[in-house]
Image: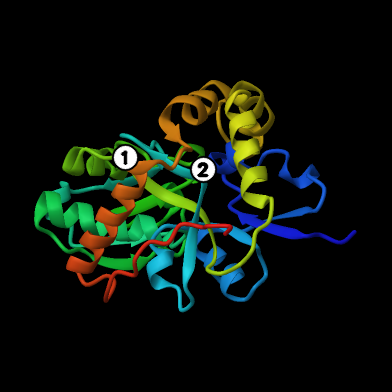
Amino acid sequence: MSFEFTVAAVSFLNAKPLIEGLDREPGVRLVADVPSRLLETLIEGEASVALCPVIDLQLSPVELSVVPCGAIGSDGPTLTVRVFSRVPMEEVAQVYTDGDSHTSVALLAVVFDELFGNKPEIKTLDSTNVNGSLAPPTTVLLIGDKVVRSQPDPDLYPHQLDLGEAWRGITGLPFVFACWMARSGQDLGELPGILDRYRNVNRARIGEIAGTHADGSGWPEELAAEYLGKILRYEIGQRELRAIELFWEKCRDLGLIERIRPMKLYDKS
């Protein structure tokens, strides 16, 4: 079968309301990868759109546009983007991360600077199973389903920080972790409308989606339904766009990006 469009996204539970059913849409091929690799699919022309971490628009060697028909964000706690520490957050010197999301690592740097005046060293975590580690790291950032599936022992990690909740407290704005992006100048035809339609349809069937995917993702079904239906946000309106731009500004001020590439929204015309 030939495909007109390839859509690349994460396989995490949090993306299901955006992509559920797309694999059955005529002319659309759906591929899955970790957040940190989705930018590569766009750069190499392997995808028409990708659900990229928002920092990637600034890191990309080619110009990208935001396709404003869906995003993964929160307007407060995320439940699944959290720092676990054996020492108080203001004493953290190093943070081990699993490297799955460029945006979450940058958000960690912004939050620690804003809240604690602290710039911890970022190191790569060899294994996300900190409970089974012989030498568990002092502080770790975990994202995605693993936070629920294998949450660190609270007796070992008594200090915890949800980065989405911290951002909301600092800025009063939601946080957008990822959104649909495409190479600038590309004609996506009817694809934005297709993506928007699936987002709207799926938002009305969260309970069914949670029931289908919770067990395979390692989630209790009731918690999965609350996460998808109440904790996460999938819209990308003016507040979300402003939040993305403010995040970029803070990343530039910390030297995480050299300059700010102006946001471009996909325009079919």
Which amino acid type is shown beneath numbered disc 1? Pro
Q: Residue at x 22, y 57 (%)?
A: 110
Which amino acid type is shown beneath numbered disc 2? Asp
Q: From the viewer's perspective, is residue 185 above or below residue 135?
A: below
For numbered disc 1, what is the local secondary structure?
loop
State which quarter of the image contains the N terminus: bottom right
- Image position, residue 161 (x, y; %): 26, 42
User: Residue 145 shows which numbered tag?
Assistant: 2
Q: Residue at x 58, y 52 (%)?
A: 10
- Image position, residue 190 (x, y; %): 69, 50
Q: Is 101 displayed left or right of 241 in the figure? A: right
Q: Is 87 displayed left or right of 30 in the figure? A: left
Q: Is residue 135 visible?
A: no
For numbered disc 2, what is the local secondary structure?
loop
Say which of marks 2 and 1 sits in front.
Answer: 1
- Image position, residue 39 (x, y; %): 53, 67
* The one of 255 and 126 positioned closer to us in this rendering: 255
Picture quadrant of residue 123: bottom left
Farthest residue, direction left: 117
Q: CA distance from mark 2 to mark 1?
A: 21 Å
Sequence order check, earlier mark of 2 and 1? 2
Q: Is 262 displayed left or right of 24 in the figure? A: left
Residue position for label 1: 174
Q: Is residue 111 visible?
A: yes
